[in-house]
Image (cartoon, rainbow, N blue to C red):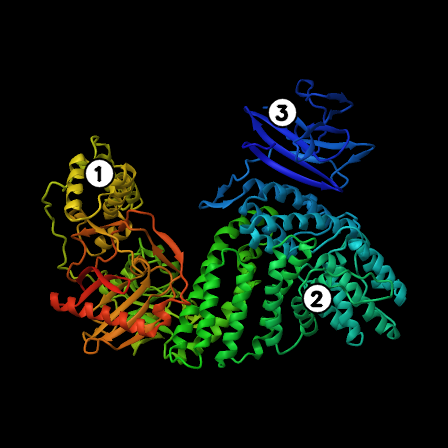
Amino acid sequence: MGGDKVLSQQCYHVGNYEIVVLVKVVSGDCHILVATNMKGYAVLHWGISKSSPGEWLAPPAEMLPEKSKLVVGACQTYFTQISTGQAFFQVVDVNFQQRNFVGIQFIIWNGGSWIKNNGENFYVDLKLMKPIGKVYGDRDGEGIVKWLLDEISRREKEAERSLMHRFNIATELTERCKTEELGLIGILVWFRFMACRHLTWNKNYNVKPREISEAQDKFTDLLLRIYLNQPNDREIVRLIMACVGRGGQGDVGQRIRDDILVLQRNNDCKTGMMEEWHQKLHNNSSPDDVIICEALLNYIKCGFRIDMYWQTLNVNGLTKEKLASYDRPIVSEPRFRTEAKEGLIRDLTAYLRTLKAVHSGVDLESAIETCMGTSVKGHDFTRVGSIGGLSQRLQECLGFVKAHVRDENIGQLMQKLLESRIELRPVLLSTHGRSKDLLFLDLALSSSVRTTMERGLKNLTFANPPEMMFFISLVLEDLCLSTVNNQDFIYCTKDWYRVSELYTNNSEWALQAKAVLDRVQLVLSERSQHYQKKIQPNADYLGNLLGVEKWAIDTFTEELIRAGSASILSSLINRFGPILRKVANLDCWQVISPVEVCGFIVSVDELVATQRRIYRKPTIILANRVTGDEEIADGIVAVLTLDMPDVLSHVAIRARNAKVCFASCFDQNIYRDLKLKEGKAISIRLKSTNLVTSDISSFNVSQNSFVSSSIPRGVALKKKTFYGKYAVSVEEFSSEMDIANKISHFMKSVRGGDLSKLQGIQESVLQMNAPMALIHELKSKMRSSRMPWPGDEGEERWNHAWQAIKKVWASRWNERAFISCKKANLNHDNLCMAVLVQEVICGQYAFVTHTKNPLSGDTSEIYTEVVKGLGETLVGAYPGRAMSFITKKTSLMSHVVIGYPSKLIGLYCKQSIIFRSDSNGEDLEGYAGAGLYDSVVMDKVEKVVLDYSNDRLIVDKTFQNSLFSKIAEAGKIIEGLYGCPQDIEGVVKDGAIYVVQSRPQI
């Protein structure tokens, strides 16, 4: 019925009826289709809104559908019955043509009764309808579904009347945006603002608890359907549901009203604070009532100490002013008869379960009781039936959790929480009559993993590795169960269990454990950045519309992350890290470029942000992220980072060549302390393989020793002359001169300081066509070199090759290279770019070897780094570390492993060709141009999440020693051939070593 031009879809459930409203475009006209599964005749009673949503006016006669008649102030249209053989429904199609109406209101007459939307008219807003999937950018191109956030803001006045209104509006809006991740994120932001009390829950409206519960039930039913039908959105749905109570039809909400009366009657407390609370419960029950009930219980249990009552309220965000602000205010303090203590504790405990059943979706005890049944009997309180079909093992685990949820010794409790989640998972993802209760149980179990771990931190022995490894493994498992696209967490968990087994019988267990935890921290960091990118723009935009306080907006995503298991895992790693480093004889710093310097601290998020700057005084950059694409700017004397660039990555080589100190910090506390010294002067000194930083006076920073560039002044680019038929000028690439003119025009701007025009030059180069002479000559040379000619597989394959060639040539004008030349006083106009053509060797590993240790300068040592897949992840400083080892040239069969791998991904491709830069701006004596220009594989490179848990290089020591010896031997031989230390790139395929490049080591 919808077709391809559906602009919006809304779905309503009223009793046993389903009503679907579609807005679609047909031949340029706007149509509204209302469909229902009602049996018998049905009539759509409707009107239009011309200027405001509250209007109900009769439509113009010329736009009435068939089987319609005008009545006073409205139109009535009979539904048309349609049967497809598989389904029966009735539909009305209203053609609004191209009229500029605000919306349409309607109700439905069906066999003697009016069908309404929770007692109100159904309303379709035409002004805010946008095509499904349409995302509107806001600030810096970050995506938000703007129409949704604007609509939420417009309807907040209605939503704040009561939780019933809010849930009904949320159901409607979620139905309209449920297929879009960003739409669901908008709903999440709205509800988290609500759950954190930044929005009003009730204002000038009396509502029965039953009505709240039913509205809540419909909303959570919709969220459950999204959870089951849209696996990729499960993580967002879980976060939304954590902000919403369970709700329920029938007597679930009504029990809030009924049971408070029973409690008052049983305990003779019908006046004062209890009566004020009773009135609030009857007219606007909310999650605050759970806190009030807990405060009363604490007050009674400790011997009627009123300070405990207020302490419980205040800790949970409720003050005297807040209680007094309710529509039915609570201004009195509780007063009970001493002899009523036992009855009050019994009945308030039972009543707390009733409140949590509606308002506290992630409360563990409530969730367990909902699934297993409550044990309270008598006293007129209602029992909740258990869920059938749960395994005996799951029931045993849940029983243990419920009995031991407050244990001080958390080990066994944590284990049972995870066992419960694992047992629950297959049931949760299957068709089950009470899937929603099971999902809330899973949310509660996951939440308890975090809170239990936080509670137990103070009792952990961080110097006891087996204990720490046990708890880290449990929290890792919890994240595997809670996250979407969790391959990285799964592989980390597998590897962590492998490393844990090494503890008693492998001297390298700490080194390997550190590598796994380094990888886990990278995964956590990338997930955090993903959340910031996806969620924070929505919080910024909607928070400002709703008038939320700035601090709550600014910290929104940070606090959301803090509320999950990722935060506690990060805390465990940070506390266990120093123990691991001590056992592995590792320092707090990994020195990549060992240079002693003094300078002023400047903190940035990414090193690339400094690239265009020129620092007029010696500057030490603290950069959270180093991508490997950067050129280190003039005036920077040191780069200290939390990231983990490889020692043999291009950016590291350039740092050593420029005499810039470069180091990774493994201690968050040390790095945090340095950030607090923003703008102050420090010195960096080397102590063995570690860094030592000291505060110094700004007067002690020597300007005399500071130069704008460490490149020797004698370095120059010599203008080359190309020989051969395939040396092609810019003009020959196109029959038109427009591209050459564009490049010339852009270069004038670049020389004037506008580096943004470099992008325009690169784009112009990519528009060039290949001269036929070049194609024929290249084909001849490749075939004579026994290389496959891409054109033999069709014109499309040649086009891929030609595009790759142009990308390499265009990289002559990339910003990183241009800045590097300028910093070294090299004339960029003299730069000549050739393209080297090589076949790709599809091996299992790639390596880079320096035949002189680049860290110590020891010429007797060979230093090597190895990665899985293509070597770009190493030289390009992709997140994570390569495996590294040192070999003495006098003992090629003996190796010292410096570090195990933590790279997140490997790059792989099918048999292909790589086009590499070969310019006169690389491999100059005293100037490292490594990585300034691009190498491009003709075919698309596949990113693969890496699993190290069964990798031979890690688990097979014999294979490892054999391979390392072959690599070291190749390095020694090549150095002997060229007579100087070499920078070698190679590939390992089926145990054989292939050297693809060697050049003098800078």
Residue at image x 77%, y 29%?
41
Foreground: disc 3 or disc 2:
2
Q: Position of residue 897 (x, y in %)?
A: 31, 74
Compared with residue 774, is residue 43 higher up or lower down, i.e. above or below? above
Near mark 2 (Cα within 10 A), the count class, few <14, some 14-19 or many ≥20, is many
Q: Which mark is residue 429?
A: none
Does residue 719 show up?
yes
Q: Please say if the residues under marks 1 and 2 sit with CB atoms less than 8 Å apart.
A: no
Residue at image x 54%, y 35%?
131
Mark before the other along the chain sequence, 3 or 1: 3
Q: Which mark is residue 96?
A: 3
Residue type (three-letter) at the residue carrying disc 2: Glu
Q: Please give the residue where the numbered disc 2 appears in the rendered image.
A: 365
Q: Please say if the residues under marks 3 and 2 sit with CB atoms less than 8 Å apart.
A: no
* Alpha carbon separation for disc pair 3 and 1: 55 Å
Badge 2 marks a residue whose secondary structure is: helix
Q: Quadrant of the C terminus?
A: bottom left
Near mark 3 (Cα within 10 A), the count class, few <14, some 14-19 or many ≥20, is some
Q: Quadrant of residue 875?
A: bottom left
> Which one is in front, 789 or 624?
789
Residue type (three-letter) at the residue carrying disc 1: Ser
* Alpha carbon separation for disc pair 1 and 2: 72 Å
